[in-house]
């Protein structure tokens, strides 16, 4: 198994997770794809993150690049990867 | 030309002379309005030797063709020679003054001269009254706004300066209706140098005719429907820019400890914390269907202010941040430059360069320093000069000073987005995140796919990426010419639609980029005329040294590489000027110095 980190900072997580609960460590088998992590997050926090990503209500950044879940769902993750979930709105 | 009054009102405060003049269509067709138009109108008057505080130095307030007509157009700009940078200074602000001055019947208001004693202006029925403001001098911006309205009309829209502008603090701002700020480049100090405390305007003439009123109405209805259906509308309304603090933190975009720290308790100063702990009231600008402004504990608050006065100074106590922002708002200080300047003082105190002990995270010290800066008391008198001059006087290495060309770095770390770094180095007003807010592309908040500007690796420094940034920088010139709020739910197709219907000039996205290039190059040439050199187009080491932890861990933008690409793509020669061929292609030969 390997560990990846999910940083759940999109505003949709605000009412579900406290500030100290926004960073998740997720264990997945080596060679796992992004889709598996999305499923695990959905299961753990009870929020359909895949749909929210598809609707562009939140975006996912992996290795410094926003990924398109339809197109990039098969990206193979590596040990230590961070998946950053943010709301695609800008700050002044 | 439709969409404009084609009139300038000029007021000489030395003589009291008031005059109107016409603006030819050629200016509108070439530079659109707002910041581009203002730079073209003042191009010949601004010289290298001109003291920004001299009576003859012009201060311009300018609107654009969209002002008051499209959604998100409740804005105007203020411009002149910046006392902070010595170069072209421009700053746009929301609120209500912009629409009102356009309704007054002019596109631009130019103020020159210096009144013998403090005055304020009342613009009404096409006339100008120059009124005594001795009793307002020294007052804060909220009191000033209320008193001017009491003395004129409640319906008047007011902009004013605070004590900082009166004392020529080089990063003093202008405040609109106790609400929005023309923050950057020190235009509040230029206003203060003219003994001008406030301007009240009553727009009794109305907006100019547009080319196709039916189409404008149709576009407006469509825009409202689109905005209502956009999930971002509710989020913007609820959180405003404050939502960004924690997100910016995670990707290393929110600076801390004078740009030296990547890990800090961001949640403590987040929008979420503010909403949980304080009464928060929404405040919007004219013709805005979102209303994103927030007053927290009675204090107008935005992300830039929170980061500049909070994390940059290592203050994570919200009350202390709100206190500091309140001082800036009332005294009339640009919160970005103020926060960075105070953080610089903390940094210098740490290093023993200045004797006074100013500790990181000391909220009371920050409030005290901001008051002293505003009143130019004690050490505040030195800090009121801005970081560039403080460093020059104290013999500090420029590489340790977080500014570009004298304008303090805003709250988007150049290590977080490689194209933001170029944007700071090449912006027409120094370190500015609003002349190309490229970070919004790479977080997929505001890409422009119509022009091939799409999210990609935020650290990418390829020619393809720089090419996207150049086009983006051009396009944003027209946002600031329109003038459209950069935070609005308003894309380039909306811009084209409204601009076409208002002016009658059919415009496509590629035309917007082409127009923006003219505006960018004009301002670039203006800055070169005012003494800017190509060597100034770089970032200091304090903001490029890789951080050992946090969201930008280990990354430093390679400006040596990307700037070569940038100059090549822009056809800029060794002297910093665009080539003769480029100037000819753009049709702006008459502005060549």
Image (tube, helix red, strand yellow):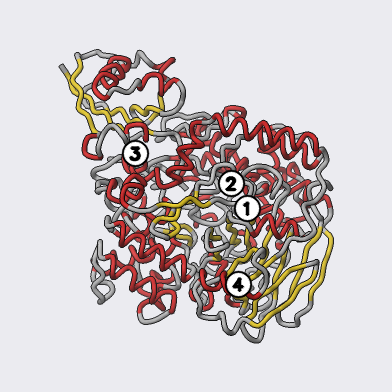
Q: Mark 2 and mark 4: span between their CA atoms?
A: 24 Å
Q: Is residue B362 visible?
A: yes
Measured from the top left, where is residue B17 in percent x and y? 78, 78
Sequence-wise, the earlier of marks 3 and 2 is 3
Callout 2: helix, strand or loop? loop
In which quadrant of the rendered view does residue B98 lie? bottom right
Residue at position x 34%, y 69% from top?
B367
Q: Is residue B372 above or below residue B69?
A: below
Q: On the image, numbered disc 2 is attached to which residue?
A: B485
The residue under label 4 is B191
Q: Earlier in the sequence, mark 2 or mark 4?
A: 4
Q: Which residue is mark 1?
A: B75
Q: In the rendered structure, find residue A32 and report the number of the disc placed on it.
A: none
Residue found farthest to the left: A1
- The chain letter for the residue carrying disc 1 is B
Q: What's the distance in space between the residues labelled 3 and 4, CA to CA?
A: 38 Å
Marks 1 and 4, the one that precedes in the sequence: 1
Q: Nearer the viewer, mark 3 or mark 2?
A: 2
Q: Nearer the viewer, mark 2 or mark 4?
A: 2
Q: At 52% from the left edge and 29% from the top edge, which residue is drawn?
A: B454
Q: Residue at x 75, y 50 (%)?
A: B588
Mark-to-mark CA distance, 3 and 2: 25 Å
Q: Which residue is mark 3?
A: B251
Mark 3, secondary structure of its residue: loop
């Amino acid at each position: 198994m390997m560990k990846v980190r999910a940083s759940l900072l999109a505003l949709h997580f605000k009412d579900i997770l406290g500030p100290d609960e926004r960073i998740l460590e997720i264990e997945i088998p080596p060679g796992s794809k992004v889709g598996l992590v999305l499923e695990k997050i959905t299961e753990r926090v009870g929020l359909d993150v895949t749909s929210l990503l598809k609707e562009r209500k939140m975006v996912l950044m992996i290795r410094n690049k926003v990924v398109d879940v339809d197109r990039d769902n098969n990206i193979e993750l590596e040990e230590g990867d961070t998946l950053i979930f943010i709301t695609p709105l800008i700050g002044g | 030309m439709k969409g404009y009054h084609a009139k300038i009102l000029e007021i000489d405060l030395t003589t009291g002379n008031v005059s109107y003049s016409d603006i030819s269509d050629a200016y509108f067709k070439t530079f659109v309005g707002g910041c581009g138009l203002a730079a073209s109108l003042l191009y010949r008057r601004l010289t290298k030797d001109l003291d920004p505080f001299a009576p003859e130095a012009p201060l311009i307030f300018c609107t654009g063709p969209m002002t008051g007509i499209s959604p998100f157009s409740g804005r105007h700009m203020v411009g002149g020679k910046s006392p902070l940078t010595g170069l072209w200074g421009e700053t746009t602000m929301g609120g209500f003054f912009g629409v009102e001055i356009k309704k007054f019947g002019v596109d631009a208001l130019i103020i020159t001269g210096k009144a013998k004693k403090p005055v304020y202006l009342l613009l009404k029925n096409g006339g100008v009254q120059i009124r005594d403001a001795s009793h307002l001098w020294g007052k804060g911006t909220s009191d000033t706004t209320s008193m001017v309205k009491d003395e004129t009309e409640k319906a008047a829209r007011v902009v004013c300066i605070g004590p900082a502008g009166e004392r020529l603090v080089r990063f003093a701002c202008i405040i609109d209706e106790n609400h929005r700020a023309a923050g950057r480049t020190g235009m509040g100090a230029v206003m203060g140098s003219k003994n001008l405390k406030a301007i009240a305007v009553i727009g009794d003439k109305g907006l100019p005719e547009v080319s196709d009123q039916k189409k404008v109405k149709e576009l407006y209805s469509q825009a409202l429907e689109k905005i209502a259906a956009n999930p971002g509308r509710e989020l913007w309304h609820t959180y405003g820019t404050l939502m960004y603090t924690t997100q910016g933190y995670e990707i290393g975009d929110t600076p801390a400890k004078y740009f030296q720290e990547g890990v800090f308790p961001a949640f403590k100063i987040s929008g979420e914390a503010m909403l949980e702990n304080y009464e928060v009231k929404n405040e919007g600008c004219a013709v805005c269907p979102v209303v994103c402004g927030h007053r927290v504990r009675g204090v107008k608050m935005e992300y830039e202010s929170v980061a500049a006065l909070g994390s940059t100074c290592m203050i994570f106590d919200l009350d202390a941040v709100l206190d500091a922002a309140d001082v800036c708002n009332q005294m009339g200080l640009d919160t970005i430059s103020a926060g960075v300047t105070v953080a610089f003082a903390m940094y210098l105190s740490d290093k023993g360069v200045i004797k006074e002990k100013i500790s990181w995270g000391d909220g009371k010290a920050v409030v005290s320093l901001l008051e002293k800066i505003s009143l130019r008391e004690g050490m505040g008198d030195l800090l009121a000069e801005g970081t560039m001059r403080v460093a020059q006087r104290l013999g500090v290495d420029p590489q340790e000073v977080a500014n570009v060309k004298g304008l303090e770095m805003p709250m988007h770390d150049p290590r977080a987005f490689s194209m933001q770094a170029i944007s700071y180095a090449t912006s027409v007003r120094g370190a500015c995140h609003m002349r190309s807010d490229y970070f919004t592309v790479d977080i997929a908040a505001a890409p422009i796919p119509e022009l091939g500007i799409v999210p990609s690796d935020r650290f990418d420094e390829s020619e393809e990426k720089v090419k996207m940034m150049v086009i983006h920088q051009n396009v944003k010139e027209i946002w600031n010419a329109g003038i459209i709020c950069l935070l609005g739910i308003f894309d380039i197709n909306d811009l084209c639609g409204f601009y076409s219907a208002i002016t009658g000039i059919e415009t496509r996205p590629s035309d917007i980029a082409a127009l923006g290039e003219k505006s960018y190059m004009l301002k670039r040439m203006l800055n070169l005329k005012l003494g800017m050199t190509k060597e100034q187009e770089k970032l200091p080491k304090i903001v490029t040294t890789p951080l050992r932890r946090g969201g930008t861990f280990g990354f430093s933008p390679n400006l040596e590489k990307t700037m070569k690409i940038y100059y090549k793509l822009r056809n800029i020669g060794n002297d910093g000027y665009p080539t003769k061929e480029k100037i000819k292609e753009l049709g702006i030969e008459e502005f060549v110095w």
